[in-house]
Image (cartoon, grey):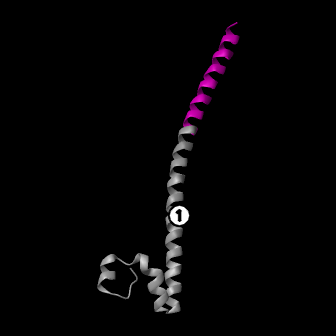
Amino acid sequence: MLCFVFITLSMLGGDAVVLWQFHLVRAQAERMNNIDQKLVVVLRVHTSLLTFHDKLEALAQSEDAGRLVTEAGPFVPQSWRTRNEQWPP
């Protein structure tokens, strides 16, 4: 009878340890998921910056001032546009 009680208590103890480990793994997975979402945002911004850089480099290599004025217009500050008629409104 004593062995049966010991085995039953051991099984319950083992189950408690397994449940505790599942809780730890779930907390770590949630933390990693949050970090992963932040990294995805950072990578999207990085990709956008690289695309913007490549586009500016292509514009600079083309040496086409009209195309530069047209495509860079939205990125030019308003104060520059009012001082220089060359930029589209």
Left or right: 22 in relation to 56:
right
On the image, the x and y values in percent for residue 66 come to 47, 90
Left or right, residue 29 beside residue 5: left
Q: How many marks?
A: 1
Which residue is more in the foreground, 60 or 43?
A: 60
- Picture residue at 53% right of the left edge, 63% below the top: 43
Image: magenta residue range: 1-25
Question: Please, what is the three-letter code of the amino acid marked with disc 1?
Answer: Arg
Q: Position of residue 67 (x, y in %)?
A: 49, 87
Q: Which residue is under mark 1?
A: 44
Q: Residue at x 55, y 48 (%)?
A: 33
Residue placed furthest toward the front:
89
Quadrant where the C terminus is found in the figure = bottom left
Left or right: residue 62 versus residue 1 is left
Query: For the stretch drawn in magenta, what is the main secondary structure?
Result: helix
Q: Is residue 8 above or below residue 72?
A: above
Where residue 55 appears, as percent x and y from the top left, is: 52, 80
Residue name at image x 56 percent, y 30 percent: 20
Task: Locate residue 1, reporting x and y percent.
Answer: 70, 6
Foreground residue among 57 and 66: 66
Q: Element type at marker 1?
A: helix
Instruction: Give me the residue at 57% from left, 43% from top.
Output: 29
Q: Quadrant of residue 25?
A: top right
Q: Is residue 20 left or right of residue 83?
A: right
**Magenta-drawn stretch contains 29:** no
Verify whether residue 20 appears in magenta: yes
Which residue sits furthest top? 1
The crowding category of the residue bearing disc 1, from other C-alpha atoms within 10 Å (few below 14, some 14 to 19, many at least 20), is few
Is residue 48 placed above or below 2 in the rendered structure? below
